[in-house]
Amino acid sequence: MEHTPGLPWFWSVIAASERRLSLLARQLEKMSRNELLEYASEYEEAKSEINPYSFEDPIWPSDGFSEDSADDFTAWVVSLGDSMYDRLREEPTRIHEFYALFEESRNGVGLNRWDKTVDRPEYRGWQSATGLAVAIYEIRFGRTFHKDLTAYEKGKRRSSVP
């Protein structure tokens, strides 16, 4: 059976945060080292499933849209929860509509934005649903997040091979 991005517990973490980074931080702070790595791994996998640069027939407009823009956009879609995520997965041709909502959110308008307030100074500068996991991981465990995530994902791939 193929692994589907966004296990139910992952989406419940996103939903329980109520689009508030301070609430997400409380949830991530309770996670073990492996749970934080799994959260980040699920987030990255979900992003890759809707990244327009990964589509066989790209539908992303080439004028002015970079891979970084696509990454920010997909992170934002995932942060909105499984309902918005599923809508874009089911109807990728609506990407321009979603991108317009993303731009509104970046400009501080619209309904689809997060409260990026964090209540701990060490989290400032990491104010996103993915960045917060990095900060919490490195502060709590004193380890390099991206290095550990790479090793974790390699281990997952090896263990999934029959």
Image (cartoon, rainbow, N blue to C red):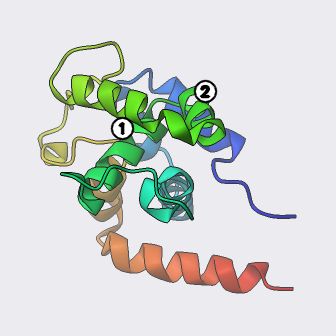
Q: In the shown orientation, is residue 85 left or right of residue 128?
A: right
Residue 99 lies, in percent from the top left, at 34, 34
Binning the other alpha carbons within 10 Å of mark 2 as few (below 14), some (14 to 19) or many (20 upward) gives: few
Residue 149 lies, in percent from the top left, at 45, 73
Say which of marks 1 and 2 sits in front: 2
Amino acid residing under circle 1: Ala
Q: CA distance from mark 1 to mark 2?
A: 22 Å
Q: Earlier in the sequence, mark 1 or mark 2?
A: 1
Residue 31 lies, in percent from the top left, at 51, 50
Residue at position x 33%, y 49% in the image: 61
Query: SS of the residue at dot 2?
Result: helix
Q: Which residue is mark 2?
A: 83
Q: Which residue is mark 1?
A: 25
Residue at position x 61%, y 36% in the image: 91
- Asked if residue 147 is positioned above or below residue 78 in the image, the reply reads below
Residue at position x 35%, y 73% in the image: 146
Amino acid residing under circle 2: Ser
Q: Are marks 1 and 2 in contact (CB under 8 Å)?
A: no
Residue at position x 19%, y 45% in the image: 123
